[in-house]
Image (spheres, rainbow, N blue to C red):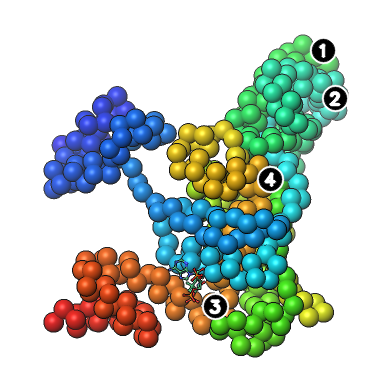
Amino acid sequence: MPKSISGFSKLSKEEKINWIAATHFANAEEVVQTIKKYWNTDASLQKLHDEFIENTITNFYLPLGVAPNFTINGKNYTIPFAVEESSVVAAASKAAKFWGNRGGFKATIINTEKIGQVHFIYNGDKEKLNTFFSQIKPKFFSETEGITKNMQKRGGGILDIILKDKTADLDNYYQLHATFETKDSMGANFINSCLEQFAKTLKDEAQTFDAFTEDEKNITVVMSILSNYVPNCVVRAEVSCNVSELAEKHIENPQEFAEKFVQAVRIAEIEPYRAVTHNKGIMNGIDAVVLATGNDFRAVEAGVHAYASKDGQYSSLSHAKIEDGIFTFWMEIPLALGTVGGLTSLHPMVKIALEMLGKPSAQELMQIVAVAGLAQNFAALRSLTTTGIQQGHMKMHLMNILNQFKATEDERKQVVKHFEKNTVTHSAVVDYLAEIRK
Ligand code: HMG
């Protein structure tokens, strides 16, 4: 069977599965059965999922977990997490409980501006281009009225459009750099539709601008697309308490703990190798809530890491200090999220996740997601600076090891009991399983 194929997209789902099984697997029948086992028995629900993407053959499950007891700006939340990594939900839950007893999390929206650009090439006189842009600028607004009408009713729309000269970086390269307010939608479709109209207006108007030579009229639009870098769509999440209030299990000396915690954050601020792992811990929380609420985690990831490098070196997204006996831990993070449009009303689990959060606005969701990231970071740093990460992480990972070795119910009970008093490591679990199986 050849390993490449033309017209694959036109095959039925059944034919696609059969081709894959026959082409890539020796145990084709077993593979087909496993793929089909993951189909939903409700045909209309399966059809909905099939149509989210292209060439769908089955579903790929991620667990949906919840972390209760989050207090954010005085309001109580149970936060849904879609994530495959053990200990993430437990860590968030533990941090929620910890800070819930110390005044909870505070979150503030700093700004909500989104960005889109028309990238174009103009080989001509710069002054003429500036004059041309000033003259036609109102047309960018008037010719997108059909697209912006509804968004304006909701209080959003195009904020501004400027002409950027980028010729110092790339010959003849300019941009229309536009800013938008997209209210409760993430705004990708709205922004891209506006940008494509700007591009058309730009090209059309150039044709009739008398001051341009024939060459100058030939503006080449390279592309029109939103930016997932949103440094002016930022939310701040914060926790603080008296240092003495930090005392708890594994934190016998709160002053020492607070100082070590601040030191750990400083290391992530100045050392990129550590910053990447530190921020990965933050993204454990961010991505999981972004996914559960039907938002685009790739866009969020790309934007967040660009923001982490905004001062010229990749650095920690979170910060910590002790001042006048008060411990403060905070983070400012760019998040372009939506609570309408996209998957938000289509995916049944996304609908449930958003309802669990009390049907938040996009701004409220930004606050919840940022808090989930900060909570995750707090939990990881707390473990790293006290017990070490492996103790808690491996405790949660125990079930994965038991599943890997197909432990029976009875074996599980014995293993869990044994490791209540012993440190979990992969080899210790394997050895103990072997011992009880003798
Ligand atoms: P513990 O103190 O052993 O937990 O912590 P506990 O059994 O005393 O329970 C206390 C609370 O923790 C519970 O309260 C729950 O809120 C939560 P309760 O519900 O009993 O009122 N909790 C759980 N929630 C759900 N299911 C569970 C569960 N167990 C406890 N099974 C814990 C154990 C894992 C929470 C702790 O050790 C911890 O927070 N560890 C950090 C884990 C972590 O950060 N994991 C992320 C993966 S590691 C990583 O990728 C990031 C990293 O590299 C980032 C970095 O370097 O910065 C570390």
What separation in Å lies between label 1 and label 4 (alpha carbons)?
46 Å
- Pinpoint residue 101: horizontal percent, then vertical percent: 65, 70
Q: Secondary structure at mark 2?
A: helix
Residue 270 in view here:
no
Q: Secondary structure at mark 3?
A: helix
What separation in Å lies between label 2 and label 3 (alpha carbons)?
56 Å
Frontmost of labels 4 and 2 is 4
In this picture, residue 286 sits left or right of residue 255: left
Q: Are marks 3 and 4 in contact (CB under 8 Å)?
A: no
* Residue positioned 19% across, 42% down in the render: 32
Amino acid identity at mark 4:
Gln
Amino acid identity at mark 1:
Asp
Q: Which residue is mark 1?
A: 210
Q: Secondary structure at mark 1?
A: loop
- Pinpoint residue 398: horizontal percent, then vertical percent: 34, 72
Task: Give the crowd class for mark 3: few <14, some 14-19, many >=20 residues within 10 Å.
Answer: some
Task: Give the crowd class for mark 2: few <14, some 14-19, many >=20 residues within 10 Å.
Answer: few
Question: Which is more N-terminal, label 1 or label 2?
Answer: 2
Question: Which is more N-terminal, label 4 or label 3?
Answer: 4
Q: Nearer the viewer, residue 212 or 291?
A: 291
Q: Quadrant of residue 363?
A: top right
Frontmost of labels 3 and 4 is 4
What separation in Å lies between label 3 and label 4 (alpha carbons)?
32 Å
Amino acid identity at mark 3:
Leu
Q: Nearer the viewer, residue 225 or 294?
A: 294
Q: Which residue is mark 4?
A: 363
Q: Which mark is residue 134?
A: 2
Disc 3 residue lies near ligand 1 with CB under 8 A: yes
Question: Which is more N-terminal, label 2 or label 4?
Answer: 2
Q: Are marks 2 and 3 in contact (CB under 8 Å)?
A: no
